[in-house]
Amino acid sequence: MHVKITSYDHKGRGIARVNKKVIFVPKVKVGEELAIEIVKDKKNYCLGKRVEPIKVKYCPYYDKCGGCNIGHLSYMEQLEFKKQMVKNIFSKYTKYSLDDLEILKSKEYNYRNKVTFHIKGDKLGYYEEETNDLISISKCKLLDEDIMVITALLNSFIKVHKSLTKAVIKSLDGKIMLILEGSEDKEKVKEFFKEKVSSLYYNNSLLSGSEELKIEVLSKEFLVRKDSFFQVNKEGLNIIYNEVINLVKSLNSKVIYDLYCGTGTISLLVSDYAKKVVGIEIVKDAIIAAKNNAKLNNITNTKFYLGDVSKVIRLLDSIPDTIILDPPRKGLDKKLIAFLLDLEVENIIYVSCNPLTLARDINLLNEKYFLKSIKLVDEFPNTYHVESITLLKLRREN
C-alpha cells in the first residue's frame, strides 16, 4: 500500500488516510510518500509500518527499538513538532490558543542518567516496539557515557554467566548504582562488579557499596535510593526547576504546598523563597527520602506528609497562597480538582509530563483559574515526550 503522510499525532506518528480511514505510521515525516504494510486493522483506524526500514546516523537499532520515536527528525524539527503538538492539544481541549509558545532546549544526546535493560541469556537490551522480542544493545546514544561503560561490562559478564534477567543502572554525578535481578550466584556477581560501581544491589539486597547516592541539583544535595524516582535528564531537570523557582520568586509566596512532592526536590529548592513549604506524597520511601534530604541541606521550614494527596490536603490547617503540582502522567485526581476549586488558592504552578492530561485538568479548573503562562522544556530529545511549566491564577470578579 502506498500512502502520503499529511500530519502527525501527539505521539509523533505520521497520519495517512485511505478510503477515509486513518492510518498511523511511526517514524515517518510529513509530506513523505512511501510504501507501508498494515500491522493492525481496527474498526476506526489502522496501524501501519514502513516497508523500507528507516536509518538514522546515531542508532543502528532505530527502526525496531521503541526507545526513540522522532529521532529521524532534525532537532529543530523535533522542537517544532512538540510546540505544534501542544498547541493542537490546547486548541482542541481548552479555550486557549498558544500563539507564542516557547520551548527550552536540552542536551540532544547522552542525557539519560538511568536505564533499564532486560536480559535473556547472553543478550542484553530493549524490547522491540510493541513486542517481547529483545534487541541486543551494545551502545545507546541517549545514555550518558558512564552508563555505557557499565553496559559494556554487563555484556562481558553475561557472555559467561547467563542467569541475569534485568539490570537497572543509575549514573549520579560520577557515581554508579547497579541494580541486578536473576538467579546467578550472588558471589560471582559481587566479585565481578563490586570494584566497578559505588552501589551494587542484587535481588533487592545490597551486596556492596552505599545504600544511597548523592546528587546535586542547583543549590541543593539529594540522596537517591534504589527505588527513588529521579528525573532521567539532570540538565533538563535544572531547566525545569529554575523555571519553577523563578515563578515562585515572582509570586512572593509565603506558604507553598508541593503536591506529589516525591523525594522533596521542588519543596527544598523553593524553600529559600517562602516562609513554609508542605510536601505531600503517597510513596513511603519517597517521604522518608524527602525528610532526609531536608536534614542533609539543613532546611527547617519544610514539612512532609505521607498519603493520598486528595485526602491529606483536607487535613492541613495552614492556607497556602501557592500550590505546586507535579503529578504522574495520568494527571490530577478528580477529588483534588474539586478541592482546588473550593480552596481558591491564589496561584497554581503545574509541572506536567503529559500535555493531554494537562489540557484536561486546565479545562476542569477553568471555572476558577485562568492560564497565565506556559513554557515547554525538551527534557527527552528524540522522543515525543515534553515537559511543561504552567502558571494558573485565581479569577477575580470585577
Image: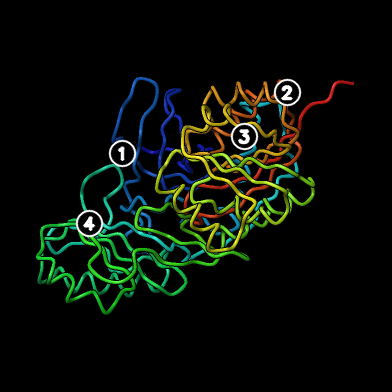
The residue singled out by tag 1 in the image is 37
Cα separation, mark 3 vs mark 4, equals: 39 Å
Earlier residue among tags 2 and 4: 4
Q: Which residue is mark 2?
A: 368
Q: Which residue is mark 3?
A: 88
- For the residue pair 52 and 197, the one nearer the viewer reads as 197
The one nearer the camera, 188 or 11, is 188
Q: Does the CB distance between marks 3 and 4 fall below 8 Å?
A: no
Kindly give the residue lying farthest to the right in the view shown.
Answer: 398
Q: Nearer the viewer, mark 2 or mark 1?
A: 2
Instruction: For mark 1, give the secondary structure.
Output: strand
3D distance between C-alphas at marks 3 and 2: 23 Å
The amino acid beneath tag 2 is Lys
- 367 above or below 322? above
Camera-near label (3 vs 2) is 2
Residue 343: x and y in percent read 68, 25
At horizontal 25% and vertical 71% (from top left) the residue drawn is: 208
